[in-house]
Amino acid sequence: MEAIKIAVCDDEKNIRSYICSLVRKQGVECEVTEYATAEDYLLARAECDLLFLDVELKGPDSSMDGMEMAKRIRGMEDIKQPVIIFVTGYEKYVYDAFDVGAFQYLLKPVDEGRFAEIFQRAAQQAGQGKRALMIQYGNTGKTIPLSDIYYMESQNHKIAVHMKDGVLEYYAKMSDLEEELQGQFCRVHKGYLVNLSYVDEYNKTEVTLTNGDKLLISKYKYEDFVKAYLRFMK
């Protein structure tokens, strides 16, 4: 996988330096860029995969806080949308953070253990955006980022791709997709191939995805699913 592009936006230089040092401890190939203000980031038209963003951005050269900056980013359809992790000294901002699609938040002072846990999951999600499924249906070719797919369902000779923005059907073999997407997707039933990123919870008979869909787990697939899921979450 190519290097993950990471941006750290915080008006306090010591905090920026600390987060950058924690990033480099994680053993993930990445490029890290620092920004002191929201204006610096937006002016640079920065396109990153993962953004650590201070909620309380302030200073003589800045009139925009991190929450306003995140809203601006989410409203810009022509740029790559990063995975956002808010860094804040106040828990009161937590619910606002999720309103702008933040992945998680870190409280200052940043705990190294919690940072490592959140970073690994965020980096996985950011890295997913670089992988895509190429499909052909009718006379049309389409590229679907794997991060847009919740699961795939076998329907006779067709595959129904259940995505964030709807369902698309095309002719393919589930066994071919299972082999192509192994590591990130897992076959939980002869009819379902699940994106492990979107597993919310599971038991011996079904898996619940983060969008609320519940899918059957075959008793013959359960053990392999659990092993694949635990490997994926490491």
Image: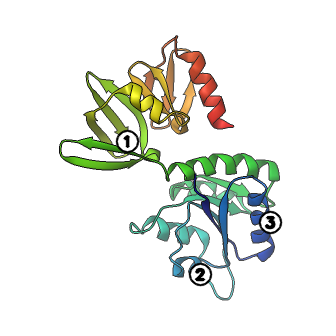
Residue 159, picture quadrant: top left
Q: Which residue is mark 2?
A: 40
Mark earlier in primary sequence (2, 3): 3
| Residue at left offset 37%, top offset 41% | 163
Q: Which residue is mark 1?
A: 163
Q: Amino acid at mark 3?
A: Tyr
Q: Earlier in the sequence, mark 1 or mark 2?
A: 2
Q: Residues within 10 Å of mark 2 (few under 14, many from 20)?
A: some
Q: CA distance from mark 1 to mark 3?
A: 37 Å
Please rate how many residues cluster around mark 1, counting C-alpha atoms within 10 Å: few if below 14, some from 14 to 19, many from 20.
Answer: some
Residue 83 rendering spot, x and y as whole percentages = 56, 57
Q: Is residue 200 left or right of residue 74?
A: right
> Compared to 18, does 141 lie above or below?
above
SS for callout 1:
strand
Q: Which amino acid does the dot numbered 2 rest on?
A: Asp
Give the percent coordinates (x, y) of residue 67. 57, 67
* Mark seen at residue 18: 3
Residue placed furthest toward the top: 219
Q: Nearer the viewer, residue 141 or 122?
A: 141
Please report the residue visible at 39 percent of the width from the left and 69 percent of the height from the top.
78
Please tell me how crowded label 3 is: few (under 14), some (14-19), or many (20+) other residues with Cα within 10 Å: few
Spatial CA distance of label 2 from label 3 is 20 Å
Percent from the top left, x then y, of residue 131?
Answer: 48, 49
Residue 95 in the image: x percent, y percent?
59, 54
